[in-house]
Amino acid sequence: MRVVGGDLRGRTLRAVPGRSTRPTADRVRQSLFDVLGQRCDGLHVLDLYAGTGALSLEALSRGAAHATLIEQDAKAAQIILRNARELGCEDRCTLVRDEVARALPRLAGPFDLVFSDPPYALRAAQETLDALLRLGLVAPQGRVVLERDRREARPALAVELELADERRYGDTVVLIAGRR
């Protein structure tokens, strides 16, 4: 895996050994940032189920001010810290090592850009989206990017959100919603 854009373009990202995480592929990240915009200047990013940290590190490479990453798995958390350190981004990252449901109420938001890529087995897209809105973690002009398995039901969007884009990449569906 590599950073696909921004100041750190081409730099290598380490992966978590084994099959405990499912990193977002380089081509999916490139396509996603084509939709979101190539620059993320000054944004505050929240990366749920962060895995390797690839999505938030990509945003930092493109100018985001800070990323908060939530990851429960110890091995993945170590990889996130290593990736951030090797890319020189560790001072712009906060890692919360906990379950997403427990971590969300403790976060100081709001966030301009939220990535949520839960393990497909959790089928957590709807619960995560509902919690983000209930807790006021999405900024007034914020966007939420939800990745889900194509077999999982599409989450219902609350009245505060409108669908900006939806794309399918094999078994992965990426939904981008913006705050109204």
Image: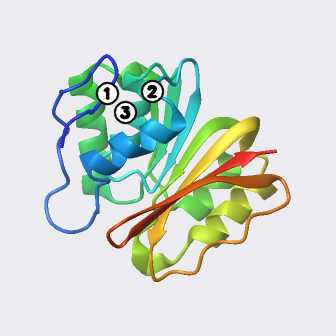
What is the quadrant of the C terminus in the image?
Answer: top right
Residue with the mark numbered 1: 5
Q: Position of residue 31 (x, y in %)?
A: 38, 44
Badge 3 vs badge 1, beta-carbon distance below 8 Å: yes
* Gap between marks 1 and 2 measured at Cα: 8 Å
Q: CA distance from mark 3 to mark 2?
A: 10 Å
**Quadrant of the rendering where the N terminus is positioned:** top left
| Nearest to N terminus: mark 3 or mark 2 | 2
Q: Is residue 117 left or right of residue 7?
A: right
In front here: 64 or 179? 179
Q: Which residue bears the numbered disc 3?
A: 58
Seen at 20% across and 69% down, the residue is 19
Hey, which quadrant is residue 172 in on the image?
A: bottom left
**In the shown orientation, is residue 100 left or right of residue 149?**
right
Pointer 1 and pointer 2: residues touching (CB < 8 Å)? yes
Q: Which label's residue is closer to the chain start, 1 or 2?
A: 1
Element at label 1: loop
Local crowd size for mark 1, using a 10 Å CA cut-off: few (<14), some (14–19), many (≥20): some
Question: Would you place residue 88 above or below residue 157 in this image?
Answer: above
Instruction: Decide: few, some or many residues near mark 3? Use Cα within 10 Å; few <14, some 14-19, many ≥20.
Output: many
Q: In the image, residue 102 lies at what x, y percent?
A: 60, 61
Mark 2, residue position: 38
User: What is the three-letter code of the residue carrying label 2?
Assistant: Gln
Amino acid marked by disc 3: Glu
Q: Which circle's residue, 3 or 1, is located before the other in the chain?
A: 1
